[in-house]
Image (cartoon, rainbow, N blue to C red):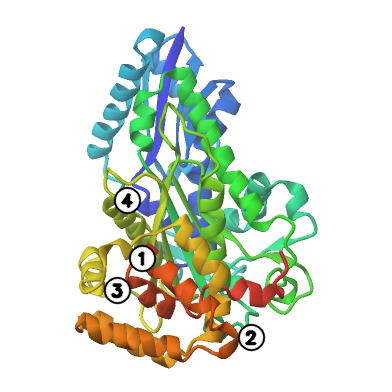
Amino acid sequence: MKFLCNLEAMNLDNMFRDCQDLNTIRGGGLSILNIADRVSELLHAEQISAGASQGLLLLESETAEDAEASVRGALAQVDILKHATIMISVEPYDQTKFKEQRAQLRARNRWRQMQSPSLVYPALKGSCICSVDKVRPGTDRPDLVEKGVQSDFTAERRTLGRAEKKKLLQDILGEDILKGADVVHDLNELCHGDQGLGNSNDKIAVLCFDGNDFGRIVNQCNQEQLKIFSTTTRKQQSTFFQELVKGREYQHHGWIGKGTLVPKLRLEVLVYGGDEVTFVVPAWLGWEALHCFYKQAEEWDKFLGRPITYSGGIVFCHHNAPIHAVRDLASGLADQAKLLRGTNKKGNFAAYQILESFDSVGQALEEHIKERYQHLDAKGILLNHETISLLKENMSYLRSSIARRKLYRLVSGLTRGVAPEDWVKARNALLDSVNECAAKKTPLTLEKLQELMGPAAYLHLLELWDYVGVADQATGGAR
């Protein structure tokens, strides 16, 4: 007898939000990333859809209880998953009621989640507290000198995180792209060696993309359509990462890691495979990655009459900023882009935030954005692919042709709400300062940017001055 099974890892803070150690975070995330793949492989079950930490399967069994028990048995073969909260709902399969059954299984998992607190009592070993998560009891471990006391759960996650990172990137990129290169294991190593790139030295970019209307698309899908959509989405995201790194030779600024001659791919993938993609790159590659994603997304075909589009958020910050706070900010920016794009805007839109000497915007994100743009044209808050491309292609040139000091004066007046004639006067002063060689091209470029974003174009130029177009500087313009 066939049964439809929905499984989903929930209450995820316990898996990867209880510490700042990147290997531990990665290990917790990887342990639940492909649970649907693992179960379908062990039970020879048909996989209808799979996303990050969830999946929908079709399997053979005698009863619903036996089907659920077999899924739990497959998961139990991975020791680290004893710490995870995984909800499993099973129902006799009826193809004519597929959409209804899928909705019922998801609702049942949500109800079970509310009834299941994620409280774990670890075995007490010694009297020391784990140096990584600061909560669980731990014992001395020889593998990490500066954080030698670790709980069993932390040690398992750190081991998995270090061991599986290269395999994850090989699965996404393919072995040929990663051939001959190693991976970095922390964010310091990821952005190390970027001297000569100005203010982006020792900085990272955290990017988050969230699919628009994916829930509506999924709700329209029958069984076969859902399988195609799940497979297609994962393939599209993998293709993006392949395009991002394929064929690039960044020399000392890109591949070479911390004091070693072994080429290292400086990319940290945090989430992919579902409706969200989150990853980290060196700051000078952040805008390049944003542009690359939306360039790929514009080529993705519609599904069930709906375009496959993503709202995005990108945060530039120092590598030692609290990773969870920065990731939440990137996700929040993507949510704001989704909200502000409205129902009438179709396509891909992104928002960004630059954290210089602080770790958060210090207030509710929506309030911060309103305050930041209160005297500027609202259309400049979100950036589409055309705007992102225009900034990428011209920023290096604009840096060499306009005076940053006069740009600052112009933006200072704009954000304070000066009279229109005053900021126009400041803009004209900026144009008057353009060097003779750029006297024709620069005004036309600024005019185009203002046409797309309104007065906010000048704010973006000033804020992104040190972060856009520096990839050309690092690669000597090579592509």
Binning the other alpha carbons within 10 Å of mark 3 as few (below 14), some (14 to 19) or many (20 upward) gives: some
The residue located at (54%, 39%) in the rendering is 234
Residue situated furthest front in the rendering: 440
Nearer-N-terminus badge (1/3): 3
The residue located at (46%, 25%) in the rendering is 226
Residue at mark 3: 361
The residue closer to the viewer here, 314 or 458, is 458
Binning the other alpha carbons within 10 Å of mark 4 as few (below 14), some (14 to 19) or many (20 upward) gives: many
Binning the other alpha carbons within 10 Å of mark 2 as few (below 14), some (14 to 19) or many (20 upward) gives: few
Single out the mark in the foreground, 3 or 4: 4
Q: Position of residue 3 (x, y in %)?
A: 43, 14
Residue 338 - label? 4
Residue 380 placement: quadrant: bottom left
The residue closer to the viewer here, 259 or 272, is 272
Above-or-below relation of 210 to 245: above
Nearer-N-terminus badge (2/4): 2
Labelled pair 2, 4 in contact (Cβ < 8 Å): no
- Distance in Å between CA atoms under marks 4 and 1: 18 Å
Residue 196 - label? 2
Single out the mark in the foreground, 1 or 3: 1
Residue at mark 1: 453
Q: Position of residue 185 (x, y in %)?
A: 61, 65
Three-letter amino acid code of the residue under disc 3: Val
- Distance in Å between CA atoms under marks 3 and 4: 19 Å
Residue 349 placement: quadrant: bottom left
